Image: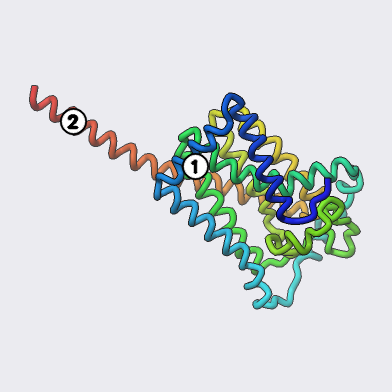
């Protein structure tokens, strides 16, 4: 497999989502997608949450422009290499295989984004509004917390740090990555690893879903994506640790926010029911 442009990436993402829905809902995969979209477009609250996520993603994109204007004169990459040594180099060389490279690039570039989009559709289709809002808050927290680190703690990708001797295997499958994809992922935006934090976040939320197939897909994909950040020569071990910690914090905080939102709604319902019962008692 060779990816030549972002257009191909978008096509692969669309096809991957289709395959996911065929697997998750084999009887009629099209209906859940339509139900999800209908529910979304008829709820202004959900639309507002989506707009908020889009705004955070926009900030993440313009972060690179802001960073260029800041012109920081320090680099923390040597510090990471000093305490990690050549662990990533060892992992890459031990597992290096052409077929494996194709698989991990597909998961890093295509499946990662596909799972984010599919999460919206799955939780909407299953009418699990609590998980839907938890997911929204968690995504916003992940990016919102990571952006300041990218601005003020420049850490270059492992392959770009000369002493490490690591290859950037991404180019074996996606040769135009630097011109097509790099605008979405800065060279020195390593800590924390968002591929790790988002993947772990999706897993923690999926574990609360009643859809066993969805849980399985997300958990397996998260494992492969985390492996890919080392295998492809992109992230340091420290980046992964930071990503995992960020994921647990974002997921826990998002769940608390969502719990508060639904607990408040529940209390109002209970209060209404209690008032009705009181009225009936008085009448009797």
The picture places residue 119, in percent across and down from the top left corner, at 57, 41
The answer to whether any part of residue 87 appears in the image is no
Asked whether 270 or 3 is in front, the reply is 3
> Residue at (65%, 72%) from the top-left corner?
65
Q: Residues within 10 Å of mark 2 (few under 14, many from 20)?
A: few
Please tell me whether residue 217 is drawn above or below residue 106 in the rendered image: above
Q: Is residue 98 left or right of residue 200?
A: right
Question: Which mark, by number, is residue 277?
Answer: none
Q: In this view, does 260 lie to the left or right of 112?
A: left
The picture places residue 38, in percent across and down from the top left corner, at 45, 41
* Disc 2 element: helix
Which label's residue is closer to the chain start, 2 or 1?
A: 1
Question: Which residue is under mark 1?
Answer: 37
Please tell me whether residue 191 is drawn above or below residue 269 in the rendered image: below
* Disc 1 element: helix
Which colour scheme appears in the figure?
rainbow
The picture places residue 253, in percent across and down from the top left corner, at 50, 48
Q: How many labels does the image show?
A: 2
> Residue at (51%, 37%) from the top-left corner?
34
> Residue at (61%, 62%) from the top-left corner?
60
The picture places residue 57, in percent across and down from the top left corner, at 58, 59
Please tell me whether residue 63 is drawn above or below residue 194 in the rendered image: below
Q: In which quarter of the image is residue 251?
A: top right
Question: Which residue is under mark 2?
Answer: 276
The answer to whether any part of residue 114 appears in the image is yes
């Amino acid at each position: 497999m060779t990816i030549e442009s972002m257009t191909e990436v978008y096509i692969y993402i669309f096809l991957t989502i289709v395959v996911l829905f065929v697997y998750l809902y084999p009887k009629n995969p099209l209906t859940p997608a339509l139900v999800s979209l209908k529910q979304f477009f008829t709820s202004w609250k959900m639309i507002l949450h989506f707009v908020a996520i889009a705004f955070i993603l926009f900030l993440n994109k313009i972060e690179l422009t802001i960073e260029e204007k800041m012109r920081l004169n320090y680099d923390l990459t040597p510090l990471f290499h000093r305490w990690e040594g050549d662990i990533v180099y060892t992992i890459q060389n031990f597992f290096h295989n052409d077929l494996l490279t194709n698989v991990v690039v597909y998961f890093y570039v295509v499946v990662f984004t596909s799972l984010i989009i599919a999460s919206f559709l799955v939780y909407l289709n299953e009418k699990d509004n609590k998980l839907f809002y938890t997911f929204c808050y968690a995504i916003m927290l992940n990016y919102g917390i990571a952006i300041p680190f990218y601005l003020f703690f420049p850490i270059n990708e492992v392959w770009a740090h000369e002493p490490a001797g690591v290859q950037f295997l991404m180019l074996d499958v996606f040769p135009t990555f630097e011109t097509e994809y790099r605008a979405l992922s800065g060279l020195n935006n390593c800590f924390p690893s968002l591929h790790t934090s988002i993947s772990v976040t999706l897993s923690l939320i999926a574990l609360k879903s009643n859809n066993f197939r969805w849980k399985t897909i997300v958990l397996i994909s998260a494992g492969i994506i985390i492996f890919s950040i080392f295998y492809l020569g992109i992230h340091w071990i420290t980046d992964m640790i930071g990503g995992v910690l960020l994921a647990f914090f974002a997921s826990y905080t998002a769940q608390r926010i969502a719990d508060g939102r639904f607990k408040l709604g529940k209390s109002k319902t209970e209060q209404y029911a209690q008032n009705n019962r009181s009225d009936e008692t008085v009448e009797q």
